[in-house]
Image (tube, rainbow, N blue to C red):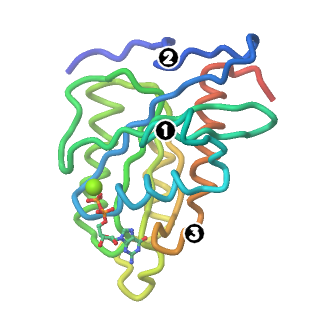
Amino acid sequence: LPSCTSQASSAGNSAASSGTPSYYRVLVLGSSGVGKSALINQFMSSENNISDEMSASDSTVSVMLDEEESLLEFCNFPDDQFPEEDINVDAYVLVFSIADRATYEYANNLMRYLRNDVCTDRSIFLVANKTDLVRKRTVDKNEARLCASYYSSKYVETSASLNHHVDNLLAGIVTQIRLKLNPDRI
Ligand code: GDP
Ligand code: MG
């Protein structure tokens, strides 16, 4: 295993002082069918997305948070694949379905891999999607939350179908990336 050394570099270039919005890349990972594409589509139609067709690409969201604009590009990684190294992103979003235990185990493996093997210190979000499928839930909320905190990651439960907590997730990603780049900000 490679030894873990700290990495301070960022994929995005923060240019808040010049008034240019900072630009961040977010990699979305997880098993096939957990709702990665559905979540990204919801980000695009979020009311937080203030970008117009002139300034946005298909997968870029402009988020206005705390009177500061940030551009987030969401990269949908191929289903069921692990990135080979800590690629040039600011945050990882690991999605699983609460109705499919195997997808949770897969997200767990991804998390362990990213923290222990790839040794990333980027923001990681563990996202429990499909919370609307209440009766099919096979992953306990506290169990998943504990796993996320063990790996110094954030845990969010969403329903892409109902657009539930998708905006929270989007704001959380921006907040964590900004904190990581500038830990002194309040
Ligand atoms: P991906 O393979 O991870 O990109 O998953 P998709 O976004 O293509 O979604 C796979 C299937 O799950 C589709 O039929 C979606 O409509 C469905 N889906 C996605 N999100 C949700 C959700 O929050 N709740 C429910 N019930 N279905 C969802
Ligand atoms: Mg997809």
**Residue at the far front in the pictured view:** 54
Give the SS element for disc 2. Answer: loop
Mark 3 residue CB less than 8 A from any atom of ligand 1: yes
Left or right for 15, reference 57: right
Cα distance in 3D space between marks 3 and 2: 30 Å
Q: Are marks 3 and 2 in contact (CB under 8 Å)?
A: no
What amino acid does circle 2 point to?
Ser
Ligand 1, seen in the image, is in the quarter at bottom left
**Residue 7 in picture, x, y percent from top left:** 45, 13
Q: Disc number at residue 10?
A: 2
**Nearest-to-viewer mark from 2 and 1:** 1
Residue at (75% x, 20% y) in the render: 184
Q: Disc number at residue 164?
A: 3
- Residue at numbered disc 1: 60
Q: Note whether 99 is above or below 144 in the view shown.
A: below
Q: Note whether 166 is above or below 116 in the view shown.
A: below
**Residue 8 in picture, x, y percent from top left:** 51, 12
Residue at (66% x, 24% y) in the render: 21
**Residue at the far bottom in the pictured view:** 135
**Residue 84 in picture, x, y percent from top left:** 20, 27
Residue at (29% x, 15% y) in the render: 3
